[in-house]
Amino acid sequence: LTALAFLARPRAARIPLKGRHVFITGGSSGIGLAMATAAAREGARVSILARNAARLEEARGAIRAATGQDVGVHAADVRDADAVARALAEAGPVDVLVCNHGVFVPQELEKQEMQEVRWMVDINLMGTFHLVKAALPAMKERTKETRLPASIAIMSSQAGQVGVYGYTAYSASKFALRGLGEALQHEVIADNIHVSLIFPPDTETPGFTEENKRRPELTNIIAGSSGGMKADDVARKALDGIKSGKFIVPCNFEGAMLAVATAGLSPQSSPLTAFLEIIGAGLMRFAAICFQFNWFTTIENWYAKNKKHA
Ligand SMILES: NC(=O)C1=CN([C@@H]2O[C@H](COP(=O)(O)OP(=O)(O)OC[C@H]3O[C@@H](n4cnc5c(N)ncnc54)[C@H](OP(=O)(O)O)[C@@H]3O)[C@@H](O)[C@H]2O)C=CC1
Ligand SMILES: CCCCCCCCCCCCCCCC(=O)[C@@H](N)CO
């Protein structure tokens, strides 16, 4: 532990929210709305971005009712780099950028239209590139001025830690965010900016309700291996992770196991978590093999029962 206290990088940081500018994409619904509300309650200046202006105004009203705070709203599509840049210029320098926007339509790749695959990758992955590119220059200036650490938080998913049946496009877009985040952390640490990747399980949100109308049965069963959560609880975990400058932010117990199983070469600021990762590595690999045994057995049985698909 003493050795790890010396080795763990980047060094742990405390990133306050009070009085700081928190910019949240997808802030009009679900997890993003819950994060915006919680951040406003903590005294942050909050801006939210999404496409639908009416839903943004509704969210603004809901946040005002819940916290007494007014939030800035920006109607833009994250696929439109110019619109994203305009929104960020309008909002002013950001201290905590939360790239939470996301779309998810599960389907077997063979059945899914390429147009839908591209749509998920464009929004979930390319949209995040647009945001980081647009926000970073002013963020860097700001950390120099305030001498406080800043944060770029990216909403992945447990489907961004393990591939799941029905999620070829979605999992690909969410795994990609981890690569983006790891490389980006190297590039921004000198400016005292900390990257956080958040990995929620199934979460009760308007988006999840929509998803459930089309979810293949096997996707449901496999995703059910991790306990579902409420948006407010995911928001709490996410903000706590951001505030302590954690790189990997799991949200539930299964998420903590997944984090150890997939620790890989990710940065780790906490000597204690690093210790648990080292001790847990073999055990969690064994657990992973057991989970995959279970999933493949379920898939085999399902296909045997539904012969037309086999
Ligand atoms: N709910 C779940 O089970 C889980 C969700 N996640 C991730 O959490 C994030 C939030 O999910 P959730 O709260 O369920 O989603 P919701 O569908 O409830 O909300 C999505 C938000 O993103 C916005 N958005 C979608 N597309 C765009 C776009 N092209 N440009 C700008 N904004 C956009 C939506 O507004 P508008 O449509 O007006 O643009 C809305 O505000 C996503 O990244 C998702 O992948 C991760 C794990 C589990
Ligand atoms: C070694 C230990 C293993 C621990 C258990 C692993 C459990 C993995 C379950 C994967 C769940 C994926 C949910 C995706 C939710 C999501 O993103 C969609 N609802 C779309 O938003």
Image (cartoon, rainbow, N blue to C red):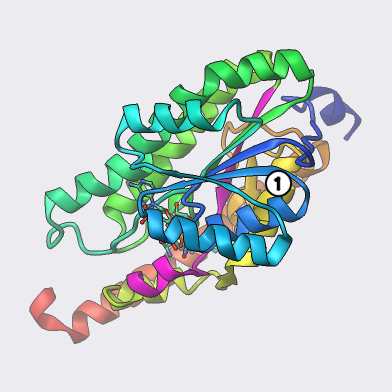
* 6 relative to 215 in the view: left or right: right
* Amino acid type, residue under disc 1 in the picture: Gly
Q: Nearer the viewer, residue 132 or 90?
A: 90
Q: Residue at x 12, y 82 (%)?
A: 307
Q: Quadrant of residue 185?
A: top right
The part of the chain drawn in magenta is 193-211
Ligand 1, what quadrant?
Answer: bottom left
Q: Where 4 falls versus 197 (above or below)?
A: above
- Assign a secondary structure to mark 1: helix
Residue in the picture at 13% in, 59% down: 110
The quarter of the rendered structure image containing the C terminus is: bottom left
Residue 241 in the image: state x and y as whole percent: 71, 46
Above or below — where is 181 with respect to 24? above
Measured as percent of width and height from the top left, residue 146 is found at 77, 19
Snapshot quadrant of residue 188? top right
Percent x, y of residue 247: 64, 37
Q: Residue furthest right?
A: 2
Image coordinates for residue 144, horizontal then vertical, percent: 72, 13
Q: Which residue is tagged 1?
A: 241
- For label 1, the crowd category at 10 Å Cα-Cα, with few meaning under 14, some 14 to 19 and many 20 or more, is many
**Nearest the eye: 232 or 51:** 51
When the figure is inspected, residue 288 is found, relative to residue 259, above or below; the finding is below
Nearest the eye: 191 or 23: 23
Q: Image point 67% across, 13% down: which residue? A: 190
Count the numbered circles shown. 1
Residue 91: tell me if it is visible.
Answer: yes
Looking at mark 1, is its residue's CB closer than 8 Å to ligand 1? no
Q: Residue at x 12, y 62 (%)?
A: 111
Q: Is residue 129 magenta?
A: no
